[in-house]
Image (cartoon, helix red, strand yellow):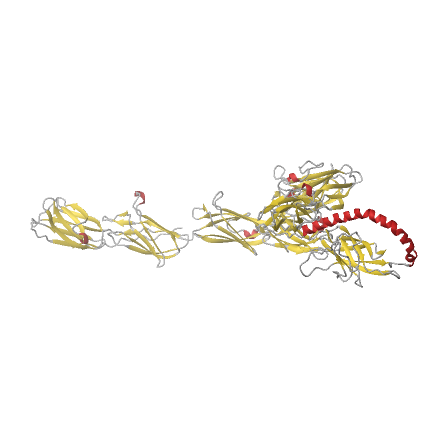
Amino acid sequence: MRVQVTPERVELSEDNAVEVFVTVHNTGSLIGGYHLRVLGADPSWVVLESENLSLFPNTAQTVRALIRIPQGVAAGERRIAVQVRELTPPQAISIAEVELVVPPSETLKLTLTPMTVVGGSSGTFGVILENSGNTSIVAPLAGTDAEDVLRFRFVPPTLTLAPGDQAIADLKVKGPRRWFGSPVVRAFGIGLQPPAEGPAEPPATEPATTPAHPGEGPPPDGGAPATPTNTGKPLASDEPLATGTLLQKPRLSRGALSLLSLLLAATVFATVITIAFSALVGQSAQDRNLAIQVAAARNSVAIAGTSTLGGTVVLLTDGAPVAGVTVELFDAAATTTPVKQTATGDDGTWKIDNLPSGSYLFRVNGAGFVQIWYPQALAASDATVITVQVGQQITDLQVTLGGLPASVSGQVVGTDVAGAVLTVQVPVEFLPPDPADVAAAAAAPVAGGDPGGAVLKTVPIGSDGAFEVTDIPSPRIYDLVVTKPGFAPEKQRIDLAAGESRTDVQLRLRTGDGLISGTVSGPDGPLGGVVITATTGSNKVETVSLTQGDVGSFTLRGLVTPATYTVTATSPGFTPQTSTLTLADGQKLTGVQLTVARSSGSLTGTVTTLPDNAPAAGVTVTIAGGATTVQTVTQSTGTVGGWMIGGLPIPSTYTVTFSRADLQSQTVAVTLDAAGNLSSGSAASGVSGNSIAVAMTSAFAVISGVVSQLEADSSTQPVGEALVSLSSGTDTYTVTSASQPADAVGSYLVAGVKPGSYTLAVSRRGTSPTSVIVSVVAGQALTYYPVLIQPASIAGTVTDRSGGTLGGLQVLLFKASAYPTESQQSTTTDAKGGYRFDEVDAPQAYVVEVRSATAGALGSATLVLAASQQAILDITVGPPPSTVTTTAVPAPNPAPPAVPPVGGGG
């Protein structure tokens, strides 16, 4: 099985929806069934075009999955996985990941309260900001007016808001005020400053002695340093986010002139009060100025050095890395403003370098997660200080981040839900290697049956069916399982984001007192190991037919009634069989008969060799038909020569070819019908049932026989050391006849002879060769018994000059080239002076010498001996010096004996 997901990384569109295409390839040799599901996403987010597939071998199918992420999900990267589980052997599981990128969406709502302030030269407003987007927003505030006469001071000047956060800033608006006349209406707008084009400069602070505006006195707050102000700065957008009005009254109104005298009288009293409080006000201003100066001095210090801090942020629930959360680094002595900050990468790692030596604290926070100070503190006072020296690198700081507690609430519906139990559990496939970090994660029995997985919480269900589970660790995938004795368990999988509050979850409790039982059969009778599934809505019950005892029987228990079920029987190699059965209240339906037909066929057989019908191992068996071609090899162990190939599409016609390098190939044509059986049209030789028996012959010939030699008495005797050669001009084979053991003398065997015509020649020392033309075909066993004529010999008589015979003398036979150092044979004359040398190598030139034990050499003679010549060589010798005369009377060569006819066999 091979799974491919396209695309592997995708950015969500404006409607937060994306299409993913999953292609499943069946790389096996059998029809495969597959089940698809998407992990890491709430089931309600995913719509699969098809959850189940059935594929023929070497085919593929693509399934479309529509994934829609709800609005409000935090920006960043999310990983989901597509799991494909093979329902047929080898029941493999493949998981392919998809990376979803949720693009940032900045939505900022700004409200001014009150919208109008009546005052003198200045007025104070409140600015309320709400981040309704899915990413953090840095909001540098700015104000503008059409006349460009107003000055705006925001406290603080810049706000940072996480998704869903609200913040409030104070705004003081100040402008020139009339001495006399009517009130002046000054309209203004507020919004965000546009991004700076150049390097950002630190905002200037105005010393306490500097007037807030030319020609004006000290700030009205008593001399405190002014918060950075701006006059008529442009906004980031063409339109302000909020508008307001400052209604300025003149300094002296009509009523004010009439009261001037009264004010003069009160001046004396005011002077006394001012003197009384001047010391207190001055001391407060000095303390505030000092704090601001200290903060400004600290912020002005450049953060630069050669040290590095870094580490990893992982999830508390499963140890997975957390990407896109903020890591803020603080001076250990000042934890109000971070000196540097960064974000974790895809692998959850972070690093901050170019740090001076010193002591630091850091904290990690992100949308939906609890803010944690290193290593696991909720407040800076409980955090661990990290001290780095110059150039030191500390990169193994790990923080375990837990999501804000999640909650799930909803309703269990059904006819009688009171007494049911809702279980929140971590699915087995999502359990961490060490589940100790999951609260109450030990698997525990659940009422109505253990649904599997690690149990997190259980909640009893009342008669109204309502439930709420709080303080659930997040983010994580959970199964909600509702059970009750006598009812079918109901399970729903949810994927909780960090801090999510999931509502309106509905689970249905169904009665489970029904039963369906029966027998499943195949083409050959009752069939065991068949998966029987009964499905109604989201409720599914599954069992397997028996393989022993009452083979093929099955029972489906705990079925919800009343209901209509789709009962499906599936088994590898068979076509799924589906039936629709309806159960009344509490009905137990028995005697159901299910029949499955083969979805693929198989062929088996044996291969032997002729002529002895020996099992043939290592024979290649190739089955071809249409687009299907499969191969196997006959067994060399167990059932030697046996073979089997399954998973063949039916009905179809196939050619079965048997081949091995040393054997003649054979081909058999067969037809498998719709039931996977060999049809009557396949009644070829050796075909029986679904088995094919083949006897193969050798691709070569064999020539054997016995080499004999004609003796002097016309009889023949087997002889060894005869050279037997077989030649066709392009191929030559040579063997030697056996000289032992005694019962095999003269036998020879030439194996592996290619079909064709050959000259078979036999030769042996001392005799004339013989030859014959033979032709052989593949698989033939040819026998040929060649007979050689009598070999050459030398015989004669040794006499003296008077004609008397000389017995007891030594006679030596030398090759002329080796005379007188190396003799070939030796003998002694008999009483009549006769001697004889048999089986003499010929043709050859020889010297025959006569010696006396006392006088040495007495005489010699030479002759050239022809093949198979029976030479007579008489030698006359006398006392030394002697004259030796020789007479060589060659015997006529006997006619070659009749050659027995060439015999064949095999």
Up-down: is 826 above or below 174? Answer: above
Question: Which percent across, then down, holds residue 354?
Answer: 60, 51
Image coordinates of residue 685 in percent, x first then y, are 50, 50
- 554 or 526: nearer the viewer: 554
Q: Quarter-wise, where is residue 137 in the image?
A: bottom right
Residue at coordinates 17% horizontally, 50% vertically from top-left?
821
Comparing 254 with 873, the one in front is 254
Q: Is residue 728 left or right of residue 90?
A: left
Q: Quadrant of residue 444?
A: top right
Query: Which residue extends farthest bottom?
Result: 147
Query: For the image shown, how many numbered marks are present on the structure?
Result: 0
x, y percent for residue 396: 60, 45
Please give left or right for residue 129 compared with residue 552 in the image.
Answer: right
Visible in this render: residue 560?
no
Q: Position of residue 625 (x, y in %)?
A: 55, 55
Inspect this view and state whether residue 239 appears.
yes
Foreground residue among 824 and 211 = 211
Q: Is residue 263 left or right of residue 415?
A: right
